Image: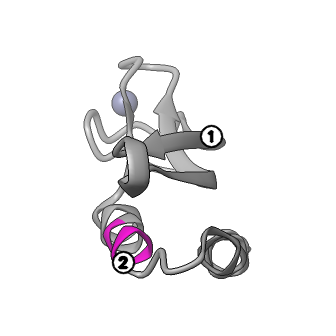
Amino acid sequence: MNCQICGKKTASIKKVTKSFGRGHSLVVIEDIPVVSCSSCHESYITADTAREIDRIRKNRVTAGKAKRVLVASFKESAA
Ligand SMILES: [Zn+2]
């Protein structure tokens, strides 16, 4: 895929697990698609991914529910 930073076709998606917040607001999100480029060595998430992370954090009523939603939607978009 094309890199959004340098424009070369050397970018690929890596799935990572990240934690956001702390204490009672802590939420761990698995399989976040991070774009990693082998030309400019930048790693970043797309605007769509950032929006999805925000949505998941706001809807973390139960961690399990949020996790299932996240995994399902990101597998869909990566296909
Ligand atoms: Zn690049």
- Depth order, front residue of 17/74: 17
Label 1, residues with CA under 10 Å away: few <14, some 14-19, many ≥20: few
* 55 falls in the magenta region: yes
- Which of the 4 quarters of the picture holds residue 67? bottom right
Label 2, residues with CA under 10 Å away: few <14, some 14-19, many ≥20: few
**Quarter of the image that includes the C terminus:** bottom right
- Depth order, front residue of 2/54: 54
Report the span colored magenta.
54-58
Q: Residue at x 25, y 37 (%)?
A: 5
Q: Secondary structure at mark 1?
A: strand
Q: Secondary structure at mark 2?
A: helix
- Is residue 42 found left or right of 9 in the rendered image? left
State the residue position of label 1. Answer: 16
- Which of the 4 quarters of the picture holds residue 63? bottom right
- Is residue 76 found left or right of 60 in the rendered image? right
- Is residue 16 found left or right of 22 in the rendered image? right
Three-letter amino acid code of the residue under disc 1: Val
**Residue 38: x, y in percent?**
52, 21
Q: CA distance from mark 1 to mark 2?
A: 18 Å
Q: Is residue 27 above or below residue 47?
A: above
Q: Is residue 5 above or below residue 72?
A: above
State the residue position of label 2. Answer: 55
Three-letter amino acid code of the residue under disc 2: Arg
